[in-house]
Image (cartoon, helix red, strand yellow):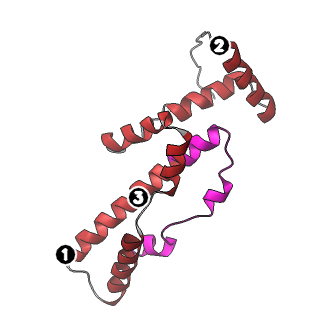
Amino acid sequence: MTEAMPMVSIEVPEPVYRRLQHIAETTHRSVEDVLVSTVNVVLPVESGLPDDVSAELAAMSMFSDDALWAAVESALSAAERTRLGQLNDIADDRSLTPAERHELNGLLSRYDYAVLRRARALALLTHRGYDVSASLDHVDVSEDDAQDA
């Protein structure tokens, strides 16, 4: 059973309506569906993330296209990726020291944050009409490195 949605009437400029209508026709959806999905992209649902992370992800909807493309590329540095791999290799041979475990947890937190930013940027770019398929093949840390920890 679908939830009843409140009815809201809004006025939008003619060019905006034409864009919504074009997207609706192209995707075989209603203008209302396109508008609701647009609002959902711009105002993401509460995620249970820390407030600062949630606020930054929400603010990304105001980023320029160039800033979003930069966010797609940002992740761990080469040195951080190398160190993550080293720590995972060490953990395969022996228990990590508390300092190494702390360092590994920090690197994994930065990696997780980068993945969230990248996913949000890709979603926004897709919504803006960009083909992001080439960016989906690019991964900065192997899945094994992130999962080994």
Which is more N-terminal, label 2 or label 1?
Answer: 2
Instruction: Tell me which residue sits at (44%, 36%) in the image.
Output: 58
Q: Label 2 vs label 3: CA separation?
A: 39 Å
**Which residue sits at x=50%, y=72%?**
142
- Contact, CB < 8 Å: mark 3 with mark 1? no
What span is in magenta?
A: 120-149
Label 3: which secondary element: helix
* Residue under numbered circle 2: 13
Q: Residue at x 19, y 74 (%)?
A: 99
Q: CA distance from mark 3 to mark 1?
A: 21 Å
Q: Secondary structure at mark 1?
A: helix
Secondary structure mainly formed by the magenta segment: helix
- The quadrant of the rendering that contains the N terminus is top right
- Distance between the Cα atoms at labels 1 and 2? 59 Å
Q: Which residue is mark 3?
A: 112
- Quarter-of-image position of residue 16: top right
Q: Is residue 108 magenta?
A: no
Residue hosting label 1: 98
Q: Position of residue 45 (x, y in %)?
A: 47, 35
Per the rendering, the mark at residue 78 is none
Nearest the eye: 125 or 88:
125
Q: Residue 35: in sight, yes or no? A: yes
Q: Residues within 10 Å of mark 1 (few under 14, many from 20)?
A: few
Q: How many discs appear? A: 3
**Earlier residue among tags 3 and 1:** 1
Callout 3 amino acid: Asp
Indicate whether residue 134 is drawn in magenta. Answer: yes
